[in-house]
Image (cartoon, helix red, strand yellow):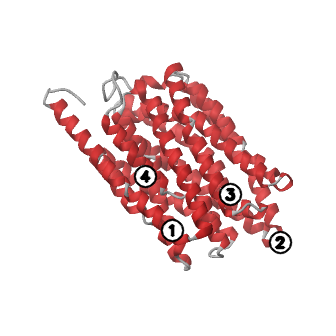
Amino acid sequence: MNKAKKSAYSFLVMLGIVSLFSDLTYEGARSIIGPYLLLLGAPAATVGFVSGLGEFIGYALRLLTGYISDKTKRYWLLTIIGYAINLFAIPALALAPGLGWVYACGLLLAERFGKAIRNPAKTTIASFAAQEVGPGKGFALQETLDQIGAFLGPVMLSIVLTLKGKDEKLSGYVLGFLILAIPAAIALGLLLNARRLYPRPQEFEQSSPAPAKGNLRPAYWFYLAGIACLAAGFADFPLMAYHFADKGIFPDNQVPLLYALAMAMDAAAALFFGAMYDKKGIGAIMAASALSAFFAPFAFLASAPWLAVIGVLLWGIGMGAQESILKAAVTTMVPKEKRGTAFGIFNAGFGAFWFLGSWLMGALYDKAIIALVVFSVAAQLASLPFFLKSKRLLSAASLSSDSGIGSA
């Protein structure tokens, strides 16, 4: 392994450790927010709406912040500001019992706003190093370290809720959110140190994998259409957690453990499909999407806990694909000079359709759960023809380039 590749791996590990502590914070919170909002009096439709709106804010605003990151090249500044907002909205949830569920929902939206600021810049920073080591492996490494934190956070909060017991249920949630201030502070400190050690991460990537001039290629737009379908049918975990608590399938203190289990599957899936992506390209995304599309029947229709666990595991596979190889594909398709913008468009489309799908599924949950399940499966499977078209266009462009005719 040459020096440049070693340095790129070290940088990706450093960013991954930042993500470990940040995921411990906000994924830990995410694992209990559904039952917490239920305790505060929020209806299911509101949980679905706020979860979807939060994802929409977190993704749609990346269209602007991605463009800004490309124009200003202030990748580190945007990353740090976004992380600060993103992380410290979580401990403030401890005040929600005195201020109401509307306040809690506002903080959830603020947390997603912070992620919207930092994500395109941070993902672009990571893409520079990932291109050096292989996009699939690079983003899979990031995702694996992410998910260690995403696993530990829910486990920690499950322990807190168990120790507090049923008689002190609400105070257990409050204590859990306060404890999350510790990993939040650690993550921000590590991020500042990464900025000090690697002030110009764009130097990892010396050349672009695609032409720097011209519009984004047609393969990118077909890929984005597939992502839109996938996002529309992919339920957010708070709605599943609400269902588990509402139907009594699992006690409150076990719901965070389910999320931890999903995050463990997420990490394993990211490594497996990340390696597959570097060999098979978009075929890896199609395989992951086809497999995870069937989480909803198990998660929302099963009365037996073990069947619900299967649904959670399939959901975790989908998350692993979303957080690793979906980004790797954008890195492969788009030159580094346009990558912030491309990630912004990608995330805006993903977030818009996640919002609409989550809102619809929250409403369907109150009317007919079977309709929610049918919509979820159908929407996700509809992504496959678009991914196939994108794969064929990329293959045709690669053959054309190799034969000296030109590139698409």
Callout 4 crowding tier (Cα within 10 Å): few <14, some 14–19, many ≥20: many
How far apart in space, not on screen, are marks 4 and 3 (Cα)?
Answer: 23 Å
The image quarter in which residue 85 lies:
top right
Judging by the rendered image, the residue that carries numbered circle 3 is: 46
- Distance from disc 2 to disc 4, alpha carbons, whole Å, reads 43 Å
Pointer 2 residue:
167
Camera-nearest residue between 100 and 13: 100
Q: Amino acid at mark 2?
A: Asp
Looking at the rendered image, the disc whose residue lies closer to the viewer, 1 or 4, is 1
Q: Which mark is residue 229?
A: 4
Q: Could you tell me residue 168's position as x and y percent?
A: 82, 67
Amino acid type of the residue that numbered disc 3 sits on in the rendered structure: Thr
Q: Label 1 vs label 3: CA separation?
A: 18 Å
> Which residue in the structure is indicated by mark 1?
371
Question: Callout 4, which amino acid?
Answer: Cys
Query: Disc count in the image?
Result: 4
Disc with the residue nearer the chain's start (3 vs 2): 3
In this view of the protein, can residue 321 be seen by the observer?
no
Residue 385 screen position, x and y as percent? 31, 52
Height in image: 285 above or below 345?
below
Which of 380/366 is in front? 366
Q: Could you say which is closer to the camera, residue 359 or residue 93? A: 359
Q: Are marks 1 and 3 in contact (CB under 8 Å)?
A: no
Question: Cβ–Cβ below 8 Å for labels 3 and 2?
Answer: no
